[in-house]
Amino acid sequence: MKRLMIVADHPFVVQSTRLALRQTAGFQVVGAFDGREPLRGPLVELTPDLVLVDDMASPTRALTRLAEIHEHAPAAQALLMTSNMAADWLGDAFTAGAAAIVSTTLHPASLATLLRELGHGTVLLREHGAEVAGVDPPRHGILRIA
């Protein structure tokens, strides 16, 4: 069972994510945390496999949380949910540590499926056009959800 941590600054995001995952087996939500606060303690204590980060009211906070995940829970996959699909913002998010980025317009059932597949390592999500080191381009798939 994959351990999922949710990071958001609004309870609606937490509730809608929990509802989306209700019908999907294989997840244990280990906690929901306010994205306005540092995550070092919960990341070290809970050792999540996946961390879902909402882009929140402050994009700077979201980037800070992604960097914390990358630093304090390097084995965890960070998935950013955002309404901003501008190339420069996506680049900043990938640089900060996002393993995947998904639009907030994604259907909740699809979010659950994406989280499951990301947790199993069956989906490769990278910035559009980015190369995957050591993998011949014809042999890998790049999935960009926008």
Image: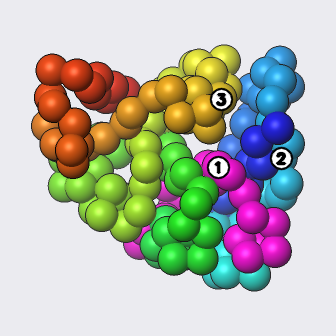
Between the C-alphas of marks 2 and 3, the distance is: 13 Å
> Where is residue 16 shown, x and y percent of the image?
74, 34
Q: Quadrant of the N terminus?
A: top right
> Where is residue 61 shown, x and y percent of the image?
49, 72
Per the image, the residue denoted by label 1 is 50
The kind of secondary structure element at disc 1 is strand
User: Mark 2 or mark 3, which is nearer to you?
Assistant: 3
The picture quadrant where one finds residue 86 is top left
The picture quadrant where one finds residue 31 is bottom right
Name the foreground residue: 82 vs 70. 70
Whether the residues at callouts 3 and 1 have beta carbons within 8 Å, the answer is no
Name above or below for residue 35 compared with residue 139: below
For label 1, count other residues whose C-alpha is less than 10 Å away and answer few (under 14), some (14-19) or many (20+).
many
Between the C-alphas of marks 3 and 1, the distance is: 9 Å
> Where is residue 25 shown, x and y percent of the image?
83, 24
On residue 116, the disc is 3
Name the foreground residue: 63 vs 95. 95
For label 2, count other residues whose C-alpha is less than 10 Å away and answer few (under 14), some (14-19) or many (20+).
some
Residue 43 within the segment the image draws in magenta: yes
Name above or below for residue 103 compared with residue 72: above
Name above or below for residue 138 compared with residue 65: above
Which comes before the other along the chain, label 2 or label 1?
A: 2
Which comes before the other along the chain, label 3 or label 1?
A: 1
Per the image, the residue denoted by label 2 is 29
Segment colored magenta:
42-63
**In the visual, does 3 lie left or right of 102?**
right
Which comes before the other along the chain, label 2 or label 3?
A: 2
- Please name the amino acid that badge 3 sits on: Arg
Please say whether residue 144 is visible from this viewpoint.
yes
